[in-house]
Image: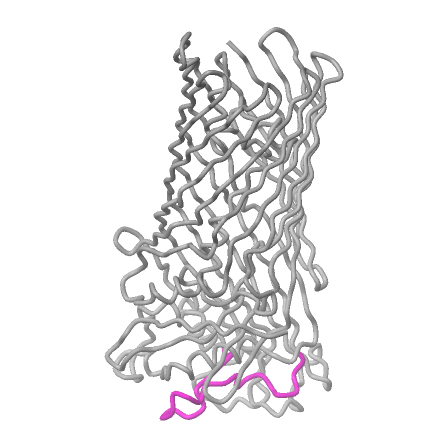
Amino acid sequence: MKRLIITLAAAATAAGASAQQWGGLLMDKDLLMPTDMIELSQTQFNFGTARAMAMAGAFTSLGADLSSMSINPAGLGMYRHGDISITPMMSFARSKGNAPEYGCNSRDRFSMANIGVVINAYEGSRSLISLNVGFGYNRIADFNYDYGFVRQNQGGTIGDAYARQLNWDGVSKNKFYTNGGSGDWVWPNDPQYWNAMLAYRGFLIDQTDPDDPGTWKPTWVGNNAGVDHYTMLRSKGSIGEYVLSVGANINNKIYIGASLGIQSVYQRKYIDYVEEYFYDAPSQNTPDFGNSGLDYQLLRWKLNQSVIVDGTGVNFKAGIVYRPTANLRLGAAIHTPTYYSLDRKFQSAAAGLAYANNDTDPNVTPDKNGYISTANDPNMTSPLLVDDGPNGWSFVSPTRLMFGASYTFGERGVISVDYERDWYNGIRIKDNPSGLDSQSWYNDSFRQNFKASNIVRVGAEFKPLPVLSLRAGFGYSGSMVRDDEFPPASPVIKQTTYYGAGVGFVLSRGVLLDLAYQYVSSKLSDYYLFYAEDKVGYTESALYSTDINRHNVALTLGFRF
């Protein structure tokens, strides 16, 4: 497997411009990376009403459904009455990877998939047959998932990556103390180094030559150590879109519509990572580690990171449906890039446990049993980074273009096919925190490493009885990663397959009840836990892969008036 080296120009300092050549699931969480913006841009139109979910969201040409406001607003023009509906949903996410499972690999969530109303505002007898106005909420992305895994007896430690990070930028540990290294501990305003500083505070790495900032390495981990990696990631949140739409019916032949969408974005990620270190003889369970060849021997190191992204987005949608015959409908819609304005928070903390084989350092104080722990050290908790106001993030998501065709079989059924193209290589960052002069790097990364994705949806509905509807759907979303042999720095959903099924009932005149089930299988791009390069070498973890599978169950209660 080839590897992609990410180079990011960071802030220019008095010492000159610095650069990073590191990445992976555990790295670069102090800022938004291109893969984070990809994830926030991945809308999933399998949400909405239960009818749309069952038919895989193939509604570019169908219309007359509240989900149309977030797909093709021209569908609102097909209403000849008012409508109001509400759709609660339960989601059950399950994850599986190429490494043995560890911790929790599932998350269940109740949410509101859709709520909305459409009003028949005008009825005419000339060319403009009707004009409808709608307002609603559609859930368009789900960030609720967990995955965890363990890899035992690995050769590398994340300490190698942090050491190479500091070596590359020539960061001296004197920077971590006042008075040029002789004073008290201080956290510099460089969150890109916080985790490396935590690794230093937690006995994982040290600068072996005080006069040479390029000599960082794991000093309390022996070369013959086996390393167990334990990783757990928990993600919470979603994107919901509030939509104001208008749709018109012209001569029962042409339907046009437009929507203004305002999105609410929230995602919170927790990443827990643990390394344990083992030696062939003696075993770690025996309090005698003299054969390791180290005066101080690290036994366990733990890192916790928390990232919150919170903000809003705004976009515009326009669409048209043409009805050349009574049974055939052809539709097209365009979604402008969503302009996102986001705030973020980042926090990390770490702890280390070590054993003194030979207590030779006067600055280290083992307990009576020879163990050294940082768990109760208040200096181990890093401060909270908050990006807000002028230091917030903003970018634009891909342009989306949709085409659809549907054919109705009298009053008995319908089949619908959609094609969508999303230009992920067109994502562009607009603002980022002051001090990061890297806007061109982000945009070049999107152009060079990502491409447009293709999405196909097929939905069908059959009515064996006037009061009963049976539905099914299938969808496939292809990869936006330009070259699978060069995995992105962090995992993104690169391929999704989904199946839907449902049933609809007419309970009474003007009252409808729809049920839907959907199975969604998402494959993440391959990823490393960490990789890093300095002037003398390269370090990387094993390569990982993860699939996230979701089971969604939704119920829509609708009223026509």
Is 362 positioned to the left or the right of 225 in the image? left
Q: Which residue lies furthest to the left in this view?
A: 14
Majority secondary structure of the magenta segment? Answer: loop
In the rendering, at what x and y percent does residue 390 appear? 25, 54
Task: Write down the quadrant of residue 277 in the picture.
Answer: bottom right
Q: Where is residue 220 in the image (x, y as percent from the top left)?
A: 55, 84
Q: Where 351 sits versus 346, above or below? A: below
Q: Depth check: 391 or 479 in front?
A: 479
Foreground of the two, 406 or 486: 406
Number of disc labels: 0
Please give the name of the residue rendered at 72% of the width and 22% of the height, measured from the top-left corner.
462
Position of 362 relative to 36 (above/below): below
In the image, is residue 262 above or below residue 515?
below
Q: Is residue 84 left or right of residue 197?
A: right
Q: What stretch is highlighted in magenta?
A: 203-226
**Residue found at the very far right of the displayed protein:** 464
Residue lying at 40% horizontally and 61% vertically, measured from the top left: 31
Residue 43 shown in magenta = no
Q: Quadrant of the N terminus?
A: bottom right
Does 547 appear above or below 375?
A: above
Measuring from the top left, give residue 117's x and y in whole percent.
46, 20
Is residue 204 or residue 6 the one in the foreground?
A: 6
| Residue 466, horizontal then vertical, whole percent | 70, 12
Instruction: Find the residue positioned furthest to the front.
Output: 324
Q: Which colour scheme is used?
A: one colour
Q: Which quadrant would residue 301 be assigned to in this image?
A: bottom right
